[in-house]
Amino acid sequence: MNIHASLRAAPTMACLAVALSAVSCGRGGQPLHGVRIPRALSVGDVVVREVREDGPAPAFRFRAGAGRLLYVFFGYAHCPDICPTTLADLRRALRLLGPDAARIEVAFVTVDPGRDSAAVLVPFVHTFVPGGHALQPSSQEELAAAERAFDAASSVSRRADGTVDVTHTGAGYVVDAGGRVLLEWDYGTKPADMAADFGVLLRLNRREP
Amino acid sequence: MRRILVLIALSVAPGCGSRSSSPPPAVTVTGAWARATAGAAGAGAVYLTLESREGDQVLGVSVPESVARFAQMHETVRTPGAGGAGTLGMRHVGQVALPPGERIAFAPGQRHIMLLELARPLAAGDTFPLALAFERAAPETIRVPIRDE
């Protein structure tokens, strides 16, 4: 069952036609904020190594638990601006969500596994989301496969003077239990808008297998 | 009468700062803050807003070595295309223009002052000094509070 079929089951059917244009609709025709059209991305079979401070973790698969949603972001721990800002905004969104925040899982994938060891990456993620999954790809191929699945990209280049330039797609992705990307938020999406969208999607995903 | 008018015009004419007898007014710095960091391994960011009544350039920023080894001005760069949403990166800028009367923001996603090789984590509630050098106005040192978000 693809995303369009699952959304059709909800009382937002009339909005699906509108969803084919630049705006998606939530409950009662209210637009979802800062949302780009999901491109029917299926990421549920992608696996990336998870790291924890207290030892190895099972490989992480990009699908939420039943009745939950998974937020995914690609970034790096040495990022001064975009990544901390996005995670701080996400933290605020989860606070606004209240008790429902327990149904949101978070995964941060480093695009710079060379510099982002577990000792650096885990505290960075947990500063913002205490239960967040810190994902450190075990190889360039593993990172590339994950990015391909999300239609994301990144680059890490080291200059002669030792400085490192990193680029990465700054979008946040919301994935359901079936491994489908339900929506994307551009960098800069406001916490209140994220919380509102989470609320809508949690209601739609209450009965997802 | 005309002579008086000419004298008045010359005394208020902009762009004569380099030869005027009085120094240009200070650059106004407001809203400075830095985000707390998890540890010292990453990088820090300082945000603030600058305004120069007559126009100026920010030529550099610095912090004590007890805070970080380097402070640099960076701007966010968006590259469309690669990947669905494009990619974001940053570029070190040597100077930042302050057009007359314009508020220039160092704000998330636009510009920031990056602190590299932090001497210790930036802890919420602490403060540290940040020095700014300008082309025309006298240098200024401000106190930057560290906040959680």
Image (cartoon, grey):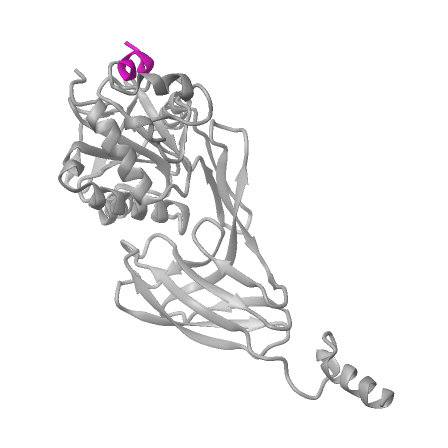
The image shows residue B114 at horizontal and vertical percentages of: 45, 57
Residue at image position (60%, 77%) is B137
- In the image, residue B110 above or below residue B87: below
User: Along the horizontal axis of the image, is A152 left or right of B18?
Assistant: left
Residue A135 visible: no
- In the image, residue A17 above or below residue A100: above
- In the image, residue A178 above or below residue A35: above
Near-viewer residue (A144 or B107) = B107
Residue at image position (36%, 20%) is A15
Near-viewer residue (B119 or B72) = B72
State the quadrant of the C terminus of chain B. Answer: bottom left
Residue B93 visible: yes
Residue at image position (41%, 43%) is A188
The image shows residue B117 at horizontal and vertical percentages of: 39, 58
The image shows residue B127 at horizontal and vertical percentages of: 32, 71
Span shown in magenta: A1-8
User: Along the horizontal axis of the image, is B88 left or right of A178?
Assistant: right
The image shows residue A40 at horizontal and vertical percentages of: 38, 17
User: Along the horizontal axis of the image, is B51 left or right of B115?
Assistant: right
Tell me if residue A61 is in the magenta stretch: no
Residue at image position (22%, 42%) is A94
Tell me if residue A3 is in the magenta stretch: yes
Magenta residues, dominant SS class: helix
> Which corner quadrant of the image does residue A192 belong to?
top left
Near-viewer residue (A123 or A11) = A11
